[in-house]
Image (tube, grey):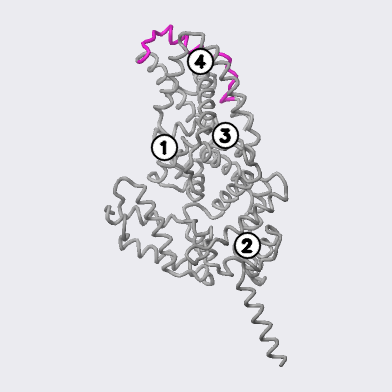
Amino acid sequence: MVTEATQQSELPKECESVMEEIFNRCAENAPNFGVRLDCFKESLQKTARKYLLNSPENVSTRELTDFLRQIQADDLFLALACSNGNERAWWEFDQNHRSYLERVARHLASTDIDAQEVVDTVYVELYGTRVVDGERVSKFSTYSGRGSLRGWLRTVIWHSLVDLHRASHDEVSLDEMTENVGEGFAHASFAETSLGGEDEMIEKIAKQRYKKATVSAIETAFANLDAHEKLLLLYYHVESMKLREIARMVESQNSPLRDWFQRKSPTREKNPESRIHESTIMRWLEKSYAKVLQLFRTELRAKHELREDEIEICMELATQDLASRNLYQNLTTT
Amino acid sequence: MEHTGKINSEELRIQGLLDRYLNRQAAANSLSAQENHLDEDSLTAFVEGNLSERESKPIVSHLVDCSFCRHVTTELVRLDLAFADTPAKVAVAEKQPSKVSEVLSGILSRIFGTSDEAVFAHQEEEKVEKKEIEKDQKE
């Protein structure tokens, strides 16, 4: 077991040998990158310590070595070499990733000029023009290898575009800003429209004596869900993610949402590696709705002491002006 | 609640209520947006499903509360889908590696509208040295 003291200082010896083993493999793949073992180990140690800090319970040495082996080591090796300003690494990075970065930027930006500006800004940020304690700080030094380098670059591009947008629109709210970047733009009117409908609905419900109980019960029901269920519902209802998009997000077997929902499912043991289809996401949503409904009813009965017929009134109130999207309809359009 | 292919009216009602409740909450929360957002590393690892259960717990909780980061993850998934068929470009080995400073010089010129001399001062020194060598050779 890794003790609390270890979390602050040195990692177990087994980790050292795993780090060296990974380094040797990377150095063999890219001998011209000039990454030193100590630099590579320092990066891995930093990531491992962050992992330990986020772990309230003790972490076994085996778990820690497995964690290290999951790092995208070749991507990290390239990032470290670029961070150090290695010419060969930069050349490889430019060859392998520039066109992808440009395509992503063009996909997100409103004009080609914006896209080029974003790519340029990201390149400068990656190289690093800021000097701290006499050393140039490269954005690459923040990459830890937990995700792929390409995925990380995609995130960097996205953030850079948001920053550019923010710089050119001084008084833009956070939502407005993010809604105007990428596909979110297409959903910009969703929350506002719902808000109008909601206000109207609240006004109607306000006239009824069951309004307070209904709102309070749905609030409690949602609050009592597990974070994974909440997140799934938020993705679907607030972010307007399609079932296909959620399925893509949980494609990896290690996806937190997939792992959580499958652990709750009796079919997991039968086929743990099966692909996640949209119908599976739909089932997860259905289960979450069922839980919300159960909690909602329980809350109305227990806390507000409502009878079945009164609960029915609340249900009616809850669904007045029901113009929300239909789960099944969404499935057929994907 | 088993999926039967028919729309269960109670389920539909709770969907509608939940939909309106969540959107109202999201609109209200955006006014008091969190300041501490997830870094690019964590966002990428979450979207790619590269996090262990230990690591994902605080991230899932953060995403529930932070509409900004949740929106970023949504957009990243959409981007991932949009570029799913893009093959990774393989480096062409026959070309000579271009200097990183040369690549960045062009970029900096475009961004700042000036030459890169102020940023890459070391290059200036190199140029001066070269000129001096050439001068010596002529002499």
Crowd tier of the residue under label 2, counting other residues whose Cα lies within 10 Å: few below 14, some 14–19, many 20 or above: some
Q: Nearer the viewer, residue A18 or A104?
A: A104
Above or below, B114 relative to A327: below
Residue under label 3: A241
Q: Tell me which residue sits at (50%, 46%) in the image.
A: B43
Pinpoint residue A11: horizontal percent, then vertical percent.
32, 59
Task: Identify the magenta region.
Answer: A303-328
> Of callouts 1 and 4, which one flags the residue occurring earlier in the amino acid sequence?
1
Picture disc at residue A155: none
Give the residue pinned by disc 1: A260
How far is the residue under mark 4 from the one under mark 2? 55 Å
Location of residue A47 by image quarter: bottom left
Sequence-first disc among 1 and 2: 2
Tell me the CA gap for discs 2 and 3: 33 Å
Which of the marked residues, 4 or 2, is nearer the chain's N terminus?
2
Is B135 situated above or below A121?
below
Image coordinates for residue A181, horizontal then vertical, percent: 63, 41
Badge 1: chain ID: A
Which residue matches tag 2?
A94
Residue B80, picture quadrant:
top right
Label 2 residue SS: helix
Q: Is residue A74 left or right of residue A161?
A: left
Place of residue A113 in the rendered image (x, y in percent of width and height, measured from the top left)? 72, 51
In this rendering, position of residue A220 left or right of residue A94: left
Camera-side residue of A15 and B33: B33
Mark nearer the N terminus (2 vs 3): 2
> Which residue is denoted by mark 4 in the rendering?
A318
Residue occupying image coordinates x 45% and y 31%: A230
Residue A326 occupies which quadrant of the picture?
A: top right
